[in-house]
């Protein structure tokens, strides 16, 4: 191979690698549900509508669980409960759940929220509103057998008796 052909081959390889890397980055960012556009459809890199409801709770699902469960030891360290939502019996509970992970999860609260519609896909935002009629401690968990399931089964809703 002469010198000119070698240079051409090298340039083609560099161009292919560059295109591949760009495509992979775009794929990863879109799979994570993070908008790559600059329109008003995203908020600080989170899906549109992923904001804390007034007087309520914002739960963000990521590869670390619910609101970084893994970093808090949930599911791994005995006795660690995460996240915890404390509410008063009889109050209206508002929860916004955003999925910034690349896989689907489901957001369930024992007794209160356990319908199939609670599946939350990558990039999706769900809003839940219900009245905390029953006092007690209720498990917050994902019921999809996801790869980080262990981190997503140690949440609690604590409804303090009125
Ligand atoms: Cu999950």
Image (cartoon, rainbow, N blue to C red):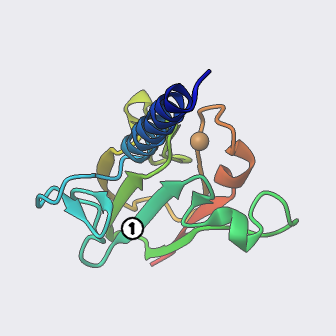
Tell me what residue is drawn at x 33 percent, y 44 percent.
124
Position of residue 38 relative to residue 158, above or below, is above
Ligand 1: give its quadrant: top right
Q: Position of residue 30 (x, y in %)?
A: 36, 42
Looking at the rendered structure, the secondary structure element under dot 1 is strand
Q: Residue at x 69, y 43 (%)?
A: 149
* Percent coordinates x, y for residue 17 in the rendering: 51, 37
Residue at the (33%, 72%) spot, across then down: 56
Q: Residue furthest left?
A: 40
The residue under label 1 is: 58
Picture mark count: 1
Q: Residues within 10 Å of mark 1 (few under 14, many from 20)?
A: some
Q: Is any part of residue 137 visible from this angle? A: no
Residue closest to the eye, 137 or 147? 147
The image quadrant of residue 71 is bottom right
Identify the residue at the far right of this view. 78
In the rendered view, does 6 fall on the left or right side of 52? right
Q: Is residue 56 visible?
A: yes
The residue at label 1 has a CB less than 8 Å from ligand 1: no
Instruction: State the residue at coordinates (49%, 31%).
Output: 4
Q: Is residue 154 left or right of residue 105?
A: right
């Amino acid at each position: 191979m002469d010198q000119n052909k070698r240079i051409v081959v090298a340039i083609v390889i560099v161009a292919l690698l560059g295109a591949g890397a760009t495509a992979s980055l775009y794929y990863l960012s879109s799979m994570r549900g993070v908008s790559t556009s600059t329109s008003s459809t995203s908020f600080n890199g989170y899906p549109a509508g992923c904001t804390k409801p007034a007087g309520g709770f914002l739960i963000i699902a990521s590869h670390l669980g619910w609101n970084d469960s893994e970093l808090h030891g949930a599911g791994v360290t005995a006795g660690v409960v995460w996240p915890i939502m404390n509410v008063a019996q009889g109050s209206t509970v508002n929860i916004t759940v955003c999925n910034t992970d690349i896989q689907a999860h489901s957001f369930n609260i024992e007794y209160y929220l356990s319908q199939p519609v609670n599946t939350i896909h990558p990039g999706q935002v769900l809003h839940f509103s219900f009245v905390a009629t029953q006092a007690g401690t209720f498990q917050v968990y994902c019921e999809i057998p996801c790869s980080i399931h262990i981190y997503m089964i140690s949440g609690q809703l604590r409804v303090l008796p009125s």
